[in-house]
Amino acid sequence: MNGIEMMVDTNVLINLVEGKANLIDKLKGNRLFVSVITEMELLGWYKITDGQKKLFSSLLRECRIVDFSSEIKSIAIAIKQNQKVKLPDAIIAATSVYLGIPLMTFDADFQKIKDLNLLLLEE
C-alpha cells in the first residue's frame, strides 16, 4: 500500500462495510492500522452473523492489527487520568499516539484527547 499511514476506529470499518460516507475514497491507497481492541469489538459482537464475521475478518486482514503493549498501556492510563473516555477508546487513542499516526473516526468524543492527531469524519 502507498499513501499515508492511519489508525482507523471501529466505527469507520462498520460504516465502510455498510457502504456509508464514501469511505472507500478516503481509505483507498492508505496503510491502515487497527487496535486489537477494534478487532475484538468487531468479531466479538454477540449478534454477529457468519457472513459478517467473514466480511470483517477479510477486512481486518487488509489492516495491520496492533497488539496491546506496555507503552500503549502507559499512554492509555495517562489518557484515562486526564479525560473522561471509555477504556476501549483510550486504548485505541493510545495506540494512535504511540504509532505517531492520525486516528480516523466518526466519534467526536476523541476530540477531548490531547496529543491525538484526529481525522474526525461526519456521518
Image (cartoon, rainbow, N blue to C red):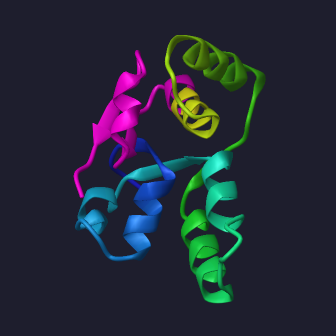
Between 120 and 3, the one lying in front of the other is 120
Between 62 and 19, the one lying in front of the other is 19
Compared across the picture, whether 57 is left or right of 108 comes to right
Instruction: Mark yes or no: residue 9 visible.
Output: yes
User: Toward which corner of the image does residue 6 lie, by quadrant?
Assistant: top left
User: Toward which corner of the image does residue 77 lie, by quadrant?
Assistant: top right
Judged from this view, the residue extending furthest toward the bottom is 51
Residue pictured at 56% horizontal, 37% vertical: 92
Marks counted in the figure total 0
Picture coordinates of residue 41, whole percent (x, y): 64, 57
Between 109 and 43, the one lying in front of the other is 109
Instruction: Mark yes or no: residue 102 visible.
Output: no
Picture coordinates of residue 116, whole percent (x, y): 40, 24
Residue pictured at 33% horizontal, 58% vertical: 27
User: Toward which corner of the image does residue 48 lie, by quadrant?
Assistant: bottom right
Judged from this view, the residue extending furthest toward the front is 84
Residue bounds of the magenta highlight:
96-123
Is 34 in the magenta? no
Vertical side of 43 occupied by 68: above or below: above
Is 117 in the magenta? yes
Between 3 and 63, the one lying in front of the other is 63
Picture coordinates of residue 43, whole percent (x, y): 68, 67
Compared across the picture, whether 40 is left or right of 81 comes to right
Residue pictured at 42% horizontal, 22% vertical: 113
Picture coordinates of residue 98, whole percent (x, y): 56, 24
Vertical side of 40 occupied by 55: above or below: below
Vertical side of 47 occupied by 80: above or below: above
